[in-house]
Image (tube, rainbow, N blue to C red):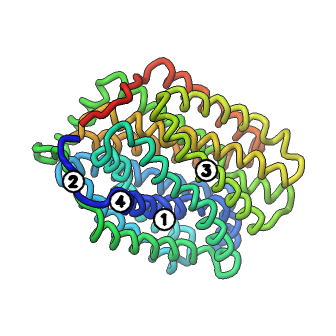
Amino acid sequence: MTKKQDGNPYVIIFALWLLVFAASSQVMIISPILPRISEQLGTPLEILGNLVTVYAVMVGFFAIIMGPLSDKIGRRKILLIGTGGISFFLFLHGFVDTFFELLLVRALAGMAGGVLSGSAVAYVGDYFPYEKRGWANGWIMSGIAMGQILGIPLGTLLADLSGFRIPFVLFGAIMALTFLLILFKVPQPNVQLSAEKVTFKGSLTKYYDLLKRAEVRAVAFSYVLMFLSISVFVVYLPTWLEETFGVSGTAIASLFFVGGIANVITGPIAGKISDRIGRKKIIIISCIGLSMVMLITTYVITDFWIAYVIFFATMVLIAMRISPFQALSTQLIKSDNRGSLMSLLVAIGQVGYGVGGSVAGPFYVKSGYVSNTIVGAVMILIMAYVVWRHVPEPELKAHQ
């Protein structure tokens, strides 16, 4: 780094961790409470996947818009706009009475999520030197794990006791706290900002120029495959377990708790190891392992307790891939275009997640959950091949 950064790195990591915790929890809670939403709103099960799709589409659309703006005005301002917006829209979830209204507020939350998407990772790329980004991303992304350990079990319990609306209000309150923490404790990093005027045509040109680079196209395609495979596999897993074994929402919540432990243990370790041995090896190993776990899921889970083992392994392998892949992606481009790149990748990834959410329901209803596991496994293997063949590995040294 060329000059000393303002702010306490550990406070910054905590603020971004809290952001990731609240943002990921309000997304993940959809899956375990789908049966509650279906019951309380009288909505057919097969169309509930559209709640995932509409959120993902809005995230993708607004991520594309906000990427160049974050390069222009700085990551801190974007973080404040995003956390303030999503906290407000999550509070609105408490007033929905129909499936259409819930779909609408999920779209609004996705809009704010699109403002945030990529900003935390881009901030890490701006603030921390490359050789420490795996460590920083590992800790920040462990907020996803804590969402599984604490946020999802608590949210599922609240949904069972007080209705599906309450968890979203809770995560909105946490996001409001995050807004205040960023406002008072997170500085704008000492990096060059884009001098270009932000226009719609200029933004499209910037994204087009990024996608002309082969390595960016490869990473973008990998993001699509990564999110598609996760969505197809995970969204209807709780529903399948409830229908197959007759378990309660509390049991499903405990499953996410166990998966969260796997995530929180694995994320920082994987990030730190990738700082030493390289990102690609960790990413490819996790993809191959995850495909195997997906394929055996419906065959080995003959009793509900086995689901704990499978989900634990799933979360270990997902966590192994996330922080190294993000750290690798941040080094593909300089700081004045980093926000655009990360927003582009998140937007494209959300396309994959949205498509996965839309097709997961029909696959599940018409062909059974085994079809979800096969599609997920195939997509993740293709991702491993793309990363292996077409994504470059930067040298592990400071770059600023």
Q: The N terminus is located in which quarter? A: top left
User: Residue drawn at (59%, 42%), measured in percent from left and top?
Assistant: 318
225 or 194: nearer the viewer: 194
User: Which disc number belongs to residue 157?
Assistant: none
In x, y percent, where is residue 400? 24, 37
| Position above or below: 18 against 200 | below
| Position above or below: 12 against 297 | below
Residue labelled with disc 1: 22
User: Which mark is nearer the camera, 1 or 3?
Assistant: 3
Graded by Cα atoms within 10 Å as few (under 14), some (14 to 19) or many (20 or more), the crowding at tag 1 reads many
Residue extending furthest toward the right? 302
The mark that comes first in sequence, 1 or 4, is 4
Residue 110 seen: no
| Position above or below: 188 against 311 | below
101 to the left or right of 161: left
In x, y percent, where is residue 361? 66, 49
The mark that comes first in sequence, 2 or 4, is 4
The mark that comes first in sequence, 2 or 3, is 2
Residue labelled with disc 3: 265
User: Residue drawn at (41%, 44%), measured in percent from left and top?
Assistant: 346
Residue labelled with disc 2: 74
The mark that comes first in sequence, 1 or 3, is 1
Residue labelled with disc 4: 12
User: Which mark is nearer the camera, 2 or 3?
Assistant: 3
Q: How far apart are marks 1 and 3 (CA)?
A: 19 Å
